[in-house]
Amino acid sequence: MRHVAVIGSGPAGYYTAEACQKTFGEGVRVDILDRLPVPYGLIRTGVAPDHQSIKAVSRRYETTALSDNVRFVGNVAVGRDVSVPELLDLYDAVVLATGAPDDRSLGVPGGDLPGVIGSAAFVGWYNGHPDFAALAPALHGPGAVIVGAGNVALDVARILAKTADEFAGSDIVGHALDALGDHAVETITIVARRGPHQIAMTPKELGELAHLHRAAAIVDADDLPPAADDAALDPGLRKSVAHLRAFAAATPDKPIRVVFDFFAQPVGIEGDGRVERMIVERTRLDADGRAVATGETYAIPAGIVVSCIGYRTPRVEGVPYDANLGRFANEEGRIAPGLYAVGWARRGPTGTIGTNRPDGFLIADHIATDIGDDSGKPGRPGLDALLSGRGVDVVTFRDWQNIERAEIANARAGAPREKFTAIDAMLGARE
């Protein structure tokens, strides 16, 4: 029997468990540990609440979780309740599937002013992550600035722009829905260092901006390259740029403006005790397609700045770390004998949810090669004894199902659930 511990219950964690099942059949036991009492990681707290079809992938993970040889071990924090060396003594393989939940810093003067928020924190706030439920962002003032040219920037802009009615059917948490309903930011500016041909925004997400009730997307036609240049783009990017061209050709007649400010990079944030404006510098592309500063600067009024420029994997004591790449140091997922990384913890914050599935099979193959038939560690019974001796209040998957039923019962009309945003409330809903 092979015993595998997976740290993190998001997509990478569950796909790894599924891959281990397919690789070893009944000859494996997988324990999935998570510091929260609830599973699914970014599916629950990262995917936009109005993208319920994407969140539905959790039903696949539920099938894996309810199988006989996979177990959810919630409310257990590695580093607090158990260490990686202890897990390596208990399991034949330990897989770090911790994702990349930490925001990269903007790294500009004034970046620490109140009102400057990383996207992980802001997205966590409207998705009900316990770490960010008390964030209380200032949704008033002269405008909002979003830094980034990917889908997370679009998610943040769309959430800021929507009316309460447009959240029907979503699982946005009540405190965020109330706050967004009380305030409307009239100008939402998306700042991108390069141009329309260099965005990482996908057509579906860009297209959603065209259907907002009270907001219109604004693109300066002068920022667009000649239309003939679009032919060289890959099909997905070509469709995205087509949306931008449509926005540039339209005549906006809605009270909220979502402005795309291309060829602009933040160089400072100013304000008296909190953010009031962002200073940006105009850029241009060099021959290699890199953004080059021009020296021309201007200010964008802002009461809130949300940075959507990428994420980093948090360090774990005793685990080699690549500070430049913001992830665990590894060779194709191998960190050290018996220790592996998968998903964003392995490759950095790139790819889609589905990208984690082949990643899981890669790690399962490594485990099969490295362990072979040489097993015999205690696995689950050893972990249970250790956690019991330390008085750790473990949450099982059956407990999670009770928590989920309580969230569904507490849902406002038309919503799939009302998430608990405090760990104590989650623990109290287990029975």
Image (spheres, helix red, strand yellow):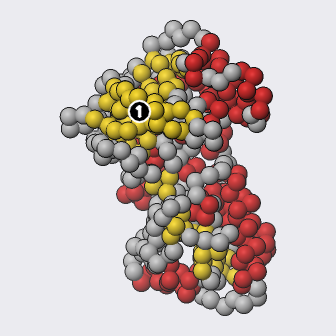
Q: Is residue 233 left or right of residue 339?
A: right
Q: Quadrant of the N terminus?
A: bottom right
The percent position of residue 394, horizontal first and vertical second, equals 47, 70
Quarter of image, res 212: top right
| Residue lying farthest to the left in this orientation | 272
Quarter of image, res 140: top left
Q: What residue is rendered at 38% in x and 48% in y? A: 107
The percent position of residue 400, horizontal first and vertical second, equals 53, 58
Q: What residue is rendered at 38% in x and 29% in y? A: 297
Q: Of the residues shown, which amino acid type is indicated by label 1?
A: Gly
Which residue is disc 1 drawn over? Answer: 295
The percent position of residue 53, horizontal first and vertical second, equals 66, 39
Q: Is residue 267 left or right of residue 276?
A: right
Of residues 197 and 282, the one drawn nearer to the viewer in this rendering: 282
Q: Is residue 307 left or right of residue 210?
A: left
Q: Secondary structure at mark 1?
A: strand
